[in-house]
Image: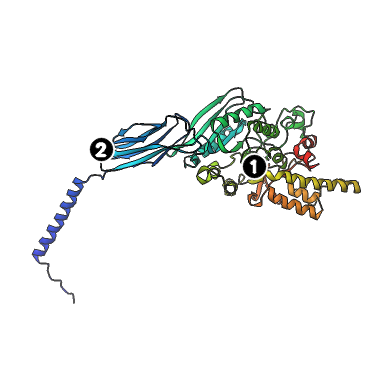
């Protein structure tokens, strides 16, 4: 049987109705009288000016009332000093150079709403004359890589917008044609990366030591630092001299190697890989190539020793290259193979070049970010990458070990009247390129293991190799790219041209510093 609920008393209904009407009225009244709470927000509480007079930095003020600004201290100008509702960009300008070796506190800005109900403070400091480090992004003319350079620069700007530099500095040398170029500075400002031009160049010839020295002399004067680093983006062919890198049209048609007598009408990077994939190996270089020895001479004359040279170029992790550059850099970051045209993922790599508040660098992070980028690359023919770091202070000791190995093989040759090195068809050496026949670059360790059978010498080699090219920096994908995807079965992270029978190698390698030091 259904149970009938008692009827609600009439008085109770009236009370409920009145309460409801009262609640609605109160809500309506509150909405009608609602006013934003006083707000005064700045995008940062510290403005950092660069060391030079006239340098500027900005921050943004967001408010819901008119506001004004007063300053304490000296050495800087501010504009505007007042604003209204919404967003206002405030510019701070340095009046003088900071001639001290330390960051300089200039003063502060106090911002207040006209009602006086909210305020904010922004301090003003100026970076020191001598930066903790200056990093140079060096991009000489490389023809069909130019669009990739522009993408690299945009990726760098993304990293800088994350405020990674602090008191350190980042300079960009970009050659815009075969003879023209610019030097500019990239810096952080109010959540963005800004660029200011420092110098323009006409009639450039970066194949000449004096030109390169002039560029870096100016960099030292403009952006002095306790330490320097450099990234180099271009085409590359390790130590192979520019004067011998090409071949004549007839040789090219016949598929033969260039010789000392051929006219170099085409260069090594002008021959497209069979499947057409684009790397930093081929392209428009013409005769404007810089030898590693020339670069070393130029940087020595400029009085710089880099903390690292990061080569965004093919084949530059070479023991011959490392020997040429050992006195101008502490570390060589490079690939013994081809580098895909995109190059390094600079938005990921650059923060590792400005660690510890911009004062340090992390080689592990650089190598790891490069490797992971190409390991995960979506395009199936482009997920190829290899990288390594050479500790250049260990290269002379490696040369000493290699000299002992070569001497042992010479004695074996004398005693046995047979070649010191005999290629084993059953165990071919790990090669790092497949575009030339004969191949020019082989894995250094793989070559030594087949060259030498002295257990004691091999042990000494292994120990020195671990110091020269530390294993934690030797990273590579399963395949590397050279006219197609090629497996990496042996990887020491560094190449040598010693076993190559290429005409270019045979005719030139005896003139290298590495050969002279090891024979």
Q: Please identify the quarter of the rendering in which residue 512 is found.
A: top right
Image quadrant for the C terminus? top right
Position of residue 114 measured from the top left corner of the image (x, y, whole percent): 25, 38
The percent position of residue 6, horizontal first and vertical second, equals 13, 71
> Could you tell me residue 274's position as x and y percent?
68, 39
Left or right: where does residue 461 sit relative to residue 357? right
Mark sitting on residue 330: 1
* In the image: residue 187, left or right of residue 232: left
Q: Locate residue 133, reporting x and y percent.
A: 55, 39
Residue 88, by quadrant, is top left
> Which residue bears the numbered disc 2?
114
For the question of whether residue 336 can be seen, the reply is no
Circle 1 SS class: loop
Mark identifier at residue 413? none
Q: Label 2 near label 1: C-beta < 8 Å?
A: no
Residue furthest to the front in view is 100
Residue drawn 69% across the image and 34% down it: 292
Using the image as rendered, state which of residue 122 and residue 331 is in the foreground: 122
């Amino acid at each position: 049987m259904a149970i009938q609920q008692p009827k609600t008393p009439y008085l109770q209904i009236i009370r409920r109705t009145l309460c409801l009407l009262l609640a609605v009225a109160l809500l309506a009244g509150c909405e009608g009288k609602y006013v934003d709470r006083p707000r005064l927000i700045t995008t940062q509480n510290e403005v950092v000016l660069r060391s030079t007079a006239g340098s500027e930095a900005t921050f943004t003020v967001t408010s819901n009332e008119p506001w004004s600004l007063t300053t304490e201290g000296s050495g800087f100008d501010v504009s505007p000093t007042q604003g209204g509702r919404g967003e206002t960009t405030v510019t701070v300008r340095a009046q003088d150079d900071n001639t001290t070796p330390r960051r300089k506190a200039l003063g502060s800005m106090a911002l207040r709403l006209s009602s006086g109900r909210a305020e904010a403070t922004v301090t003003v400091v100026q970076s020191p004359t001598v930066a903790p480090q200056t990093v140079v992004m060096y991009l000489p003319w490389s023809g069909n890589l130019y669009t990739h350079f522009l993408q690299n620069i945009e990726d760098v700007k993304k990293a800088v917008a994350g405020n990674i530099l602090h008191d350190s500095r980042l300079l960009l040398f970009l050659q815009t044609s075969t003879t023209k170029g610019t030097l500019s500075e990239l810096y952080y400002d109010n959540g963005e990366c800004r660029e200011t031009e420092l110098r323009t160049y006409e009639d450039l010839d970066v194949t000449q030591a004096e030109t390169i020295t002039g560029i870096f002399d100016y960099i030292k004067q403009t952006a002095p630092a306790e330490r320097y680093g450099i990234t180099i983006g271009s085409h590359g062919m390790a130590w192979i001299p520019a004067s011998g890198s090409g071949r004549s049209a007839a040789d090219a048609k016949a598929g033969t190697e260039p010789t000392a007598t051929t006219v170099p009408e085409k260069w090594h990077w002008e021959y497209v890989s069979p499947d057409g994939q684009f790397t930093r190996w081929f392209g428009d270089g013409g005769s404007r190539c810089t030898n590693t020895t020339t670069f070393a001479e130029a940087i020595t004359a400029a009085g710089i020793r880099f903390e690292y040279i990061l080569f965004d170029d093919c084949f530059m992790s070479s023991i011959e290259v490392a020997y040429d550059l050992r006195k101008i850099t502490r570390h060589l970051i490079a690939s013994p193979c081809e580098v895909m045209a995109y190059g390094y993922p600079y938005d990921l790599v650059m923060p590792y070049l400005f660690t510890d508040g911009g004062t340090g660098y992390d080689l592990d992070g650089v190598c790891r970010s490069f490797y992971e980028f190409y390991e995960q690359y979506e395009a199936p023919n482009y997920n190829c990458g290899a990288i390594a770091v050479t500790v250049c202070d260990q290269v002379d000791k490696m040369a000493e070990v290699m000299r002992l190995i070569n001497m042992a093989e010479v004695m074996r040759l004398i005693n046995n009247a047979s070649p010191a090195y005999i290629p084993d068809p059953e165990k071919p050496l790990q090669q790092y390129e497949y575009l030339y026949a004969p191949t020019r670059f082989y894995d250094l360790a793989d070559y030594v293991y087949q060259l030498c059978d002295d257990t004691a010498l091999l042990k000494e080699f292994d120990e020195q190799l671990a110091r020269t090219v530390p294993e934690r920096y030797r990273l590579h994908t399963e395949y590397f790219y050279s006219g197609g995807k090629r497996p990496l079965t042996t990887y020491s992270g560094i190449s040598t041209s010693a076993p190559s029978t290429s005409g270019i190698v045979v005719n030139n390698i005896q003139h290298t510093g590495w050969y002279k030091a090891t024979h």
